[in-house]
Image (cartoon, rainbow, N blue to C red):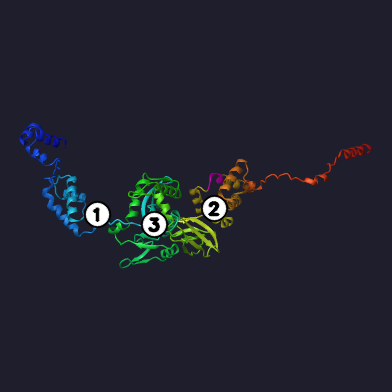
Amino acid sequence: MELFENIRREYEFGAGTIAGVARKLGVHRRMVRDAIRNALPMGRKKPDRPHWKLKPFIPLIESMLEEDRNAPRKQRHTAHRIWRRIREDVASFDVSERSVRKYVRKRKLALGLIGRETCVPQSYPWGSEAQVDWYEAYADLAGERTCLQVFEMRSMAGGGSFHRAYPRATQQAFLEGHELAFARFGGVFRRLRYDNLKLAVKKILRGYRREETARFIAFRSHWRFEAVFCNPGEDHAHEKGGIEGEGGYFRRNHWVPVPQARDLEDLNEQLLAACYEDEQRKIAGRELTVGQAVLAEKEHLIPLAEEGFDLAEVSFPRVDGMGRVKVRTNFYSVPVRAGLEVQAKVYASHVELWHEGQCVARHERCYSRFQEILDLEHYLEPLERKPGALAGSKPLEQWRQKGRWPVSFDRIWEELMIRNGRQHGTRRMIELLRLGKTHGHEKLREAVESALELGSCDVATVQYLITARQLDRAAAEPLDVGPLRCYERPLPVMTDYDLLLRAGEVRL
């Protein structure tokens, strides 16, 4: 730019001729003519030709790209694959991969094999629509790298989002995520947009028609929203681009680096805090921050239902001879007599077992297959009849693995067996475990440790230590007797009576 300015100045106020300007400034006469014609230098022309080494192999590359016209989208040649194929087939091929990539990209654009579709911007009234999706992410739970499925919902008008992680993308997790998201936004959106996920769609019919699952229909009816499904196939992912972009933004900003958490509940608290943290940002082109938009949109949402939807998947298994019921593919212990039928309620994170209108057992849900989830407290009654089975029982082993059987329990169990014998000592230990079932496991552990410190292993001692705090009573406050003071009498004095007794002894 400065050179063009000097050329034009010299031509107008200096040498005055093209040849003179070129001679004085040391440039070509063609550049002088260009500067005189236009004050802005023309852009440099980039030669649009392949590297000379690549020319002999262009027909081979073109044949591969031509084949890709009829190949499935996910089974087309990449530039790296083309480079590798030519290098494997042709011994004299010494072209760099960068040159191949450059040429292949230009040709794919020309052939229409790649390229982004033009989308039409949309506007959304307050509370009109939210989009729902799942994505996969990793977290370190208790120091172990775990793959999780994350439910997300995004408000299209306000830009607010909700994210919650689950071990698996089950229907219970899917429905629970909706309810928690509605509570987070303070209402229900009039329309929710989904992919054709199997949790909601049983069969894709012609056009926009879908055969939905009965449970999803009941859930939608309870919360009074409309469900809209995208066209099938990844080519139509742009139909819910808001949630796709939200997933990428949230993953880059809150899943990097890999989050650390004690357990899944702790991780979900971190994710919820991150959702509220994102309310401080302002989306490009909008006047309000995300948090301000969420508050403004709340007034336009459908009010929350008075009661939540029953999210449980219900079945009626029968108790087997080992005190277990089979729920899906796993076995869960239950303190009910063998042969009876119980009601199993499966939620996203736990399983409840009901009998005669009471919840008799509650287990953390297991997502593996053919596993046994056993609670030692459910086997205390049969163990009283068979105390020898306690030492090698699988419920005891699982308690040890979960940290529910501390070292103090082994110590007092050993003392009880030394004092009462193996069989009776084990029965006394089972009595102690029953105290934990009544008063709580943590109180029992503290009482056992206190009893061992006092040098006692008696069950009555442990029971007293558990209930000792309940026996403490606050001192009674003194009462003002008022006019009753006139009836006060002095306490009797026994001095005269003592003298009388002494006189009697002297006479004797």
Q: Amino acid at mark 2?
A: Leu
Please name the amino acid that badge 1 sits on. Answer: Arg
For marks 1 and 3, the one nearer the N-term is 1
- The first of marks 1 and 2 along the sequence is 1
Residue in view at x 5 percent, y 35 percent: 19
In percent of width and height, residue 241 lies at 32, 55
Magenta span: 405-410
Q: Nearer the viewer, mark 2 or mark 3?
A: 3
Residue 440 visible (yes or no): yes
Tell me the SS state at disc 3.
loop
Q: Which residue is mark 1?
A: 116
- Gap in Å between the C-alphas at discs 1 and 2? 66 Å
Question: How busy is the neighbourhood of tag 1: few (under 14 within 10 Å), some, or many (20 plus)?
Answer: few
Residue receiving disc 2: 390
User: Could you tell me which secondary element the residue under label 1 belongs to?
Assistant: loop
Question: What residue lies at 49% left-to-right and 49% top-to-bottom?
Answer: 402
